[in-house]
Image (tube, rainbow, N blue to C red):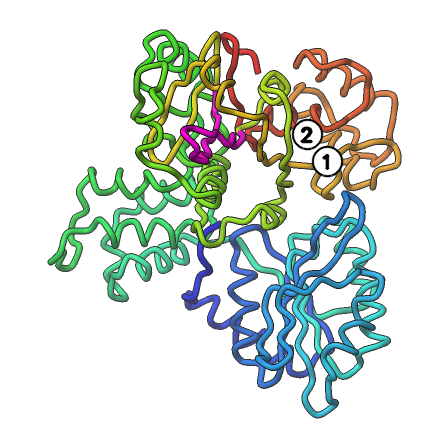
Amino acid sequence: MDEHIHFYTALRRRMLDSLSTTLAHEHWVVMQGVTGSGKSTLARGAITHWPNRALTMSPTNSKGYQWEWTVIADTEVSGNLTGRAFSSNSLWRELLCATDAMPDHPLLLVLEDSHRVPKGIVAIVEMFIALMPQAHLLITGNFSNRQQRQLRINHPVWFQLSGVRVDDYRQVFAFYAGIEPGEGRAFPDKFIRDMMKRSQGNLHLAARAGRRYHGSAPSGDGAHDTLPLSQQADTLRCLPAPRRGGRLWLALFLVAIVSGSAGGYFAQPLSRGFPSPARWITATKSPVKPPALTSGILSARGSLALLYSVWGYEVDQGEAWCDQAFRAGMACVSGTDTLASLMAQGLPWIAALEIENTHIPVVIIGGGGDSLVALSGEKTWVLNKAWFSSVWKGSYTLMWKPSPDGNGSISKKSSADDIVWLDTMLSRVLNVDAEETGEWSPVLIEKIRQFQRQNKIKADGVMGRISLIRLWQALGESPKITSDGGKA
């Protein structure tokens, strides 16, 4: 979760001017683009140009099946609605009562990430057209083909954001690196393309790399005629690491458990969206002595920020909240459970330890034999399980990825989009052809069973929570802890 981008490339500046002009004359507009293409940046720019009140809302999945719209930004100081949630079924009626909109001061309403709502987005638009004829609506998202067809029925003005170009990436990086316009071209093309490859063209990560370079660049850097390879490597280090062989990580993990020294994040590689664990490679000998572990204690939100980091998101401690995990397509869960059950899930989790009347949260990222591997701050610890059990009372917090529609399971009653996604992803993992029919077929059930057998899950043909967790891990989109000699 990187900071918002406040810089516009030349192309995005022209698009912002066009979007602002269009919103002033059109009732509703759709902006389509992939992650990191600049949708949120353009939407915030349009709000800045809007002369009246503007509200930005994001979808929230409640109870696994009920969708609400939460106001995440409101330009009005008096009666500010930020943080208030509205049911999808009564969104516009409640907003009419809450905003007291006047015809001569039309509202601008922005629905971000609308593609996350599996059903009803067209009904929301039609209700808006009927109930709020004086307001203006901007819908953003990375819509599926089916959602696009449904939205186009009502003939909106459609903005399609193209993929990020090399020049766009270079401009954003140079701006946040503190480089004067024109000097950014001094950076080698290979360096820029390496950053693009690691970040999949995500401009938020270009800004992150620019900030890293700005913070590490020596003073008096001049015109940046040359960029040492060491500085290139340091800048790339803040971006998601490229894929590496899982056997190497497993071997490193086993060496750490045996030696009780160097530690790190020894899971199978996550995805191109996750950072390198190089900053976590300092470990102490097992078992850990309580005074050493208590030397640098994380706050509750500090441990959540660290858990977000394990998932590949950099979040400030002040913004690390469990209920914000939905913005990354994740669910954040807290409760009490046994150590065996949590390790069997195979996901990193926060354990709250009680040592000498002190509350100490640590992030468990691995385990094997009689040891656990935990993160606390920037250090990695190898903990003795017996000692751990004596200071841990079973409380935990973890994150996991539900289906793209936000559901904890996928069945024949699920949406066609969820079923198509499941068939496509299972086919990719199993290296077979996908049906892509959106139907719950016997072939799909057999694929589920085959995947479950491969991952030592009960082969019942039901795509439940554990099966979804294993599928995301097999796709490289979820971290995975290693335990008991490599079995998670």
From what the image shows, is residue 109 above or below residue 418?
Answer: below
Camera-side residue of 270 and 73:
73
**Percent x, y for residue 187?**
25, 51
221 sits left or right of 126 in the view: left
Residue for point 79% across, 61% down: 87
Magenta residues, dominant SS class: strand
Task: Give yes or no for contact between labels 1 and 2 (Cβ–Cβ under 8 Å).
Answer: yes
Q: Which residue is mark 1?
A: 421
**Percent x, y for residue 284?**
30, 20
Q: Which residue is mark 2?
A: 425
**Percent x, y for residue 155?**
78, 69
325 sits left or right of 205 in the view: right
Camera-side residue of 407 and 442:
407
Q: What's the amino acid at mark 2?
A: Met
The quadrant of the image that shows the C terminus is top right
Magenta span covers which residues?
349-366
Q: What's the amino acid at mark 1?
A: Trp
Asked which quadrant contains residue 55, the reply is bottom right
* Residue 357 drawn in magenta: yes
